[in-house]
Structures are given as C-alpha cells and as structure tokens.
Image (cartoon, rainbow, N blue to C red):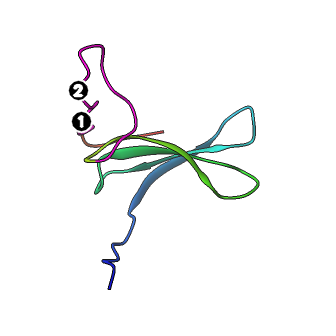
C-alpha cells in the first residue's frame, strides 16, 4: 500500500505559457504543473527535487513560507 499525504498549497501562480507554479510549505517544494494536462513538469526543493546546485547537491529544503 502506498502512503498518501495531503498537499497543503501555499500559493499558485499561472505563468505566461499557461502552466502553474504551485508551492507547498509542508513538502518544502515548488512545482511546475502543465496547465492543460495537469502533469507535473518539474519540482524544486524538498527531499526529491529535480534541481541541483553547481556542486552537485540537491537544492534542498525551501524556507517557509514558500510562494510561487
């Protein structure tokens, strides 16, 4: 059985391409979501973010509060 966790949204912002930046303070992440399909484009911060710094480390936990 997979673990389910609620996503507490802190802010949402629509970009010029029609996609959404969604911040979650409980997950310490910023997500980019496709405005048409709802698919996740990328996520930044948190335990499993997709961005690294120049030294190869994960961007890490974003400070609270996080706003898109």
Residue 37's spot in the image, x, y percent?
73, 58
Residue 52, quarter of the rendered image:
top left
10 Å neighbourhood of mark 2: few (<14), some, or many (≥20)?
few
Residue annotated with mark 2: 57
Which quarter of the rendering shows the N terminus?
Answer: bottom left
Residue at position x 29%, y 47% in the image: 28
As displayed, is residue 57 above or below residue 2? above
Tell me if residue 58 is in the magenta stretch.
yes
Can you tell which mark lies on residue 11? none
Residue annotated with mark 1: 60
Residue 9's spot in the image, x, y percent?
43, 58
Please give the count of numbered marks on the rendered protein: 2
Residue 57, quarter of the rendered image:
top left
Left or right relative to 25: residue 43:
right
Left or right relative to 3: residue 10:
right
Tell me if residue 51 is in the magenta stretch.
yes
Q: Which range of residues does the magenta coloring cover?
A: 48-62
Residue 66, quarter of the rendered image:
top left
Residue at position x 27%, y 37% in the image: 62
Q: Farthest residue toward the top?
A: 54
| Magenta segment, prevailing SS (helix, strand or loop) | loop
Residue at position x 35%, y 41% in the image: 49
Q: Secondary structure at mark 1?
A: loop
Residue at position x 76%, y 54% in the image: 36
Q: CA distance from mark 2 to mark 1?
A: 8 Å
Mark 2 touches mark 1? (CB < 8 Å): yes
Q: Secondary structure at mark 2?
A: loop
Residue 51's spot in the image, x, y percent?
38, 31
């Amino acid at each position: 059985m997979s673990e389910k966790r609620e996503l507490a949204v802190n802010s949402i912002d629509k970009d010029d391409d029609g996609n959404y930046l969604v911040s979650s303070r409980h997950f310490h992440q910023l997500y980019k979501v496709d405005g048409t399909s709802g698919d996740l484009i990328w996520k930044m911060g948190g335990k499993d973010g997709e961005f690294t710094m120049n030294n190869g480390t994960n961007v890490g936990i974003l400070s609270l509060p996080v706003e898109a």
